[in-house]
Amino acid sequence: MTAGVEDLLRAEAPQVLGALLRRYDDFATAEDAVQEALIAAAEQWPRDGVPDYPRGWLIQVANRRMLDTLRSEQARRRREEDHPIEEPPAVLDEDDTLVLLFMCCHPALKPSAAIALTLRAVGGLTTAEIAGAYLIPEKTMAQRISRAKARIKESDVPFRLPTPAERAARLAAVLHVLYLIFNEGYASSAGPDLQRRDLSTEAIRLTRGLHALLPADAEAAGLLALMLLTDARREARTGANGELIPLTEQDRGRWDQAQIAEGVALITAALPRGPVGPYQVQAAINAVHDEALTAEETDWPQLLALYGVLRGMTENPMVALNHAVAFAMVHGPAAALDLLSTLATDKRIAHHHRLHAVRAHLLEMAGRREAAAEEYRRAANRTASVPEQRYLTLRAARTLAG
């Protein structure tokens, strides 16, 4: 299957699923029917050519699959009376992606289930691809997605954009899911690749749609700005062989200046609107990094202040870890190492590789090379990301070599 056909199918999948849901109101069965239609298209279109109206073709095929399934159920007669075979779902021009997004991010679902369902129904990834990203068996991921669809069915969520009140209740979950999807794409937690561009690109696409729906929401704008400002550095984060290149050593000429300009404009417009939330602060932090022409020109006092604000908004230990790095750049590594000692007792991060990596970096800054190398090795042993393992192991050797 060509990349063009694959991209087209991924873009059309939410629209086809939306058309079926509007008529049948059965998420699980409709989603399965759409997947079968996508498989049929992937097999036929490269051979026979893409039809003039791809969405209509997919809806017709998915509708036939849907009706075949309904016929086999005990409620066949009632369902066929409600949904006559000769009347397939109408081909709608409206974009159902955001409707699906809010449905998949229903507060009744756990974040892990919401992410998986969103990637499947909205992002167009297969169950196998999602399972691979999480390093779990495909069968396990299929069960997780099935349970999520069952929860949605039990909750009787109508297929429509939520009312303003419902939207407010679900928006935090939607933003959180998009944030987690982007993070997994930007820095994969495991596997041979540092980044999964399909995930980060899809997260940006979905967040653009959310921002278009809610242009006045400062946190939606902040999240989009955060993604753009972070993703702008994507090409410079890896070398020719996929090796990790830290921020301070990146070729800033490879950063995407158009994305940086868009991200800066978004956060500049969002911050005065208030109230200021964590996504806006994180976007502001990344704007400071992106606007520095060299690593030496980075405004660390401003970053330290911003991390201080962010720490007041969240108890996330990763924020405290980044705050310690900024503190070291302003006040020196010794004082920052004292800050890390309090994180060592936090069970959420005590055994995380990033705590060891940051401690190693601060020890290296302080000239304690042997201790730094040991911490780099500990960090390497505690990450499932192959590029990170290689980078940390190499950093340990270089630290000892001086």
Image (spheres, rainbow, N blue to C red):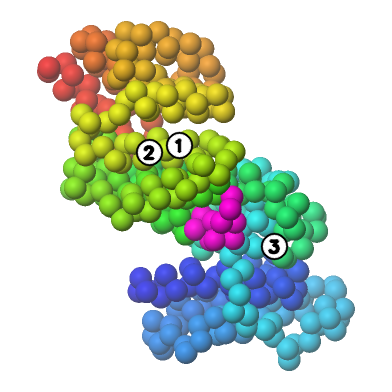
Q: Residue at x 60, y 56 (%)?
A: 214
Residue in view at x 32 percent, y 13 percent? 331
User: Which dot, 1 or 3, sits closer to the camera?
Assistant: 1
Q: Main secondary structure of the magenta part?
A: helix
Residue appearing at x 74%, y 52% in the figure:
166
Give how far across and how far down residue 125 sits, in percent. Answer: 50, 60
Q: Earlier in the sequence, mark 1 or mark 3?
A: 3
Where disc 3 sits, the SS reads loop
Where 156 falls versus 353 (above or below)? below
Q: On the image, numbered disc 3 is attached to which residue?
A: 161
Question: Residue 100 location in percent, x, y?
Answer: 63, 62
Amino acid carrying mark 1 in the image: Gln
Residue at far front of view: 272
SS for tag 2?
helix
- Residue 209 in view here: yes
Q: Check if residue 208 falls in the magenta segment.
A: yes
- Mark 1 residue crowding within 10 angstroms, few (<14) / some (14–19) / many (20+): many
Query: Which residues are drawn in magenta?
Result: 207-217
The residue drawn where x is 18% and y is 22% is 397
Asked if the residue at tag 2 contacts the one at tag 3, i.e. Cβ–Cβ closer than 8 Å, the answer is no
CA gap, disc 1 to disc 3? 28 Å
Disc assigned to residue 282 = 1
What amino acid type should be assigned to the residue bearing mark 3? Leu
Q: What amino acid type is highlighted by mark number 2? A: Asn
> Does 240 sit left or right of 182 as displayed?
left
Disc 1 element: helix
Q: Which residue is mark 2?
A: 286
